[in-house]
Image: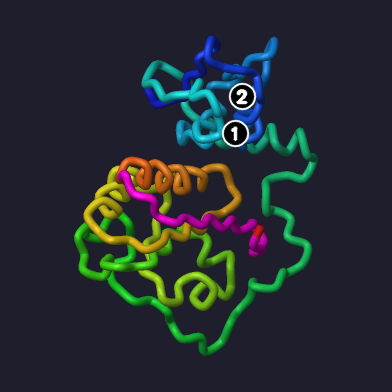
Amino acid sequence: MERKIIKIDQEKCNGCGLCVGACHEGAIALVNGKATLMHEHYCDGLGDCLPSCPVNAISFEVREAPAYDHAAVMAAQKAKTGSGCPGSQMKTMQPGIGVVANVESQLRQWPVQIKLVPVNAPFFHQADILIAADCTAYAYGNFHQKFMKNKVTLIGCTKLDQVQYADKFTEIFTYNDIRSITVVRMEVPCCGGMEYAVETAIKNSGKQIPLEVVVISNDGRIL
């Protein structure tokens, strides 16, 4: 099949290995001192590795490649760690998980879905924005008070939504006076796409908007 996949320029690569750690799927390895895409079917095409490269040796290309195989990635991680699928063995409930009764909603606007919100909505003026992967609100129990309070909330999933988030965010950041951005994502690899889209959009907008990234573990802790 033809799809988007990373491309590593061997001449530019300095062998620092930062992309190896940034690729949560384990698609990249160092071979003879150079980063190499070892498993094409491990690469989900979201590009978590791109911002980690200090010499811009990694880019996207569209070409024939095997489809992304999530099951193979999970099996490889299980074989490596012996712990199974991340989050599959929750031993104890951590603070922040569980039911919080009678909590007042902190939602300030509608809609909240990234693909539905108008780029020139009036609530963006002088706003502090929360951009959250939709799973985070289920994983972190005190989500409204901790993250949503006094913020404009946008939610979505880079894995499921058929939207170019970077393009949508670029329009929002360009056309509005945004004060700050908080990204809340899960620790799973696919959530890196949300963080990357926001970073790309800030760069494309030509503005310097303060950005904070918060990562939530699969058992509901802030990492």
The residues bearing labels 2 and 1 have C-alpha atoms spaced at a distance of 7 Å
Q: Amino acid at mark 2?
A: Ile
Q: Which residues are magenta?
A: 206-222
Read off the residue under disc 2.
28
Confirm or deny contact between disc 2 and disc 1 (CB under 8 A). yes
Read off the residue under disc 1.
23
Does residue 60 appear in the picture of this structure?
Answer: yes
For residue 180, above or below residue 142: above
Residue 190 placement (x, y as % from top left): 51, 43
Q: Quadrant of residue 175?
A: bottom left
The residue located at (57%, 43%) in the rendering is: 189
**Secondary structure under the numbered disc 1 in the rendered image:** loop
The residue located at (37%, 63%) in the rendering is: 179
For residue 30, above or below residue 53: above
Q: For this rendering, which residue is in front, 33 or 219? A: 33
- Please say whether residue 213 is one of the residues in the magenta stretch: yes
- Please say whether residue 123 is one of the residues in the magenta stretch: no
Q: Earlier in the sequence, mark 2 or mark 1?
A: 1
Q: For this rendering, which residue is in front, 81 or 180? A: 180
Q: Amino acid at mark 1?
A: Cys
Residue 51 placement (x, y as % from top left): 51, 35
Crowd band around label 2 with a 10 angstrom C-alpha radius: few (<14), some (14–19), many (20+): many
